[in-house]
Amino acid sequence: MNLHGKTAVVVGLGRSGLAAIHLLAGSGAKVRANDKKHEAELGSLAEGARSRGATLFLGGHPDEAFVGADLVVLSPGVPHLDAVRRAHDRGAKIVSEVELASWWIESPIVGITGTNGKSTVTTLVGQMMERTGRPTFVGGNLGDALTLAVGTPASKQGGSVVAELSSFQLEDIDTLRCRVAVLLNVTDDHLDRHGTFASYAAAKGRIFGTQAEGDHAIVPAGDALCLSLARAGAGTVHTYGGTDGEVRVIEGAIVDTLSGLSVPTRELGLRGLHNQANACAAALAARLAGASKDDIAHVLRTFRGLPHRMVLVRELDGVAYYDDSKATNVGATVAAIDGLADHEGQLVLIAGGVDKGGSYEPVRARMDTRGRAVVLIGQAAPLIRAAFTASTVPLHDARTMDDAVTRARSLAKRGDAVLLAPACASFDMFTSYAHRGDEFARAVLALGGTEGATS
């Protein structure tokens, strides 16, 4: 789209919004910046938008910000507001920030989505592609906004762009094409935004809808929903994991049946059985994007994981303490519990926060088998407690993270693990999942006792 002289409205003045404003202004568009927050709340972000020539409409979403707009760019997390719908009815094109970025990206895009695991897989694939020697950009929903890739060597022919894509970002794409598209899983999440599971799954599936013949669609073997979404697109469907995936665990090793890659799972830098599936997905995506088996094997052996994703904080008095604060939905918490299946003891789970609309029954089912106890925090504690009505696993309430860690320690026995995997958002008690994880780690490290392994 030739944007010179066009009027573009960017809604949401976070990092993605500011990057979009910069790109639009550089393309000759007349830019308006809109956010529900007031200028005092936005601080340097508002000044950054103004310095790029944007006209600011702050403290709400007035129609005057959208009247006459040719293009409306939505930052991640911004819903379809009434004012945006009216702008669409007047003829404005509505797109996400990642769609906008894709108009200028010439290099192949590896896109990765899913309810859980997408940041880990995105980072793995990014490091694998970097080892090829190609200029590589890694971002999207993770780290840098995709618009920041525009104009870099990674965005040109011969480069590589690896993008984590959320359901919010995928909702409003029209032409963004992923030469390699990965859908890791779809479980209940963001139902407060999407309304129904079907709507949420459809948003995830849009990653395949813009693919062309010769592109690659990657999904977990045996996942009927993910397979159906992938087959709706034009890309060639590949599977990983299970008993027949192209890349799967065979006799204790991550094996690519086509490239000859073989990395014993004991040599993986990542902990947890669920991360073996993530490793398989990343290895398949990177191979299809052009990485060698040696590049892939090196990263699988050396990558130690992202913060707050199944990080072993400490082993104290024979109890292991794991921080998986990024487990912000039920599916992620179930994956975290399953990931500790090879842990010999039982689990004390710390869970709770802001409810996201899913059922907690899958957590109860896992804890009925593996659980020593559950310590509840935050607003969702009554909802989680209700799901455990018929369970024999004892539940305990905690008002603070320090209280939760102290209670968990008193409940755990030698050989057990204490797992922070909240199944909820963090914003009732903390500023982010990272803040929640940091507070957990601080409280754990403040405990007195004898350092030592769980055996």
Image (tube, rainbow, N blue to C red):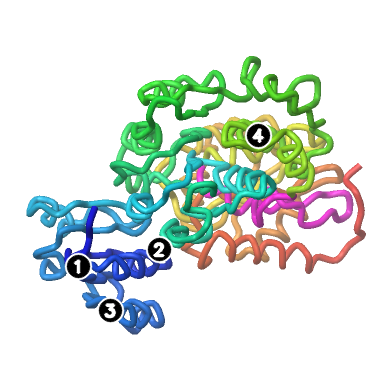
Q: Return the residue at label 1.
A: 61
| Amino acid, disc 4 | Ala
User: Which quadrant holds the C terminus?
Assistant: top right
Q: Which residue is mark 4?
A: 283
Q: Amino acid at mark 3?
A: Gly
Q: Position of residue 404 (x, y in %)?
A: 66, 59
* Cα–Cα gap, marks 4 and 1: 44 Å
Q: Amino acid at mark 1?
A: His
- 326 magenta-colored: yes
The answer to which of marks 4 and 1 sits earlier in the sequence is: 1
Asked if the residues shown at circle 2 and circle 4 are in contact, with their CB atoms under 8 angstroms apart, the answer is no
Residue 360: numbered disc:
none
Viewer-side label of 1, 3: 3
Q: Residues within 10 Å of mark 3 (few under 14, many from 20)?
A: some
Instruction: Please report whichever mark, 2 or 4, sits nearer to the chain's N-terminal start.
Output: 2
Secondary structure of the residue carrying tag 3 is: loop
Disc 4 or disc 1, which is closer to the eye? 4
Q: Earlier in the sequence, mark 2 or mark 1?
A: 2
Q: For mark 2, what is the residue?
A: 16
State which quadrant residue 45 falls in.
bottom left
| Residue 338 visible to the viewer | no
Give the image location of residue 257, x and y in percent. Answer: 69, 19
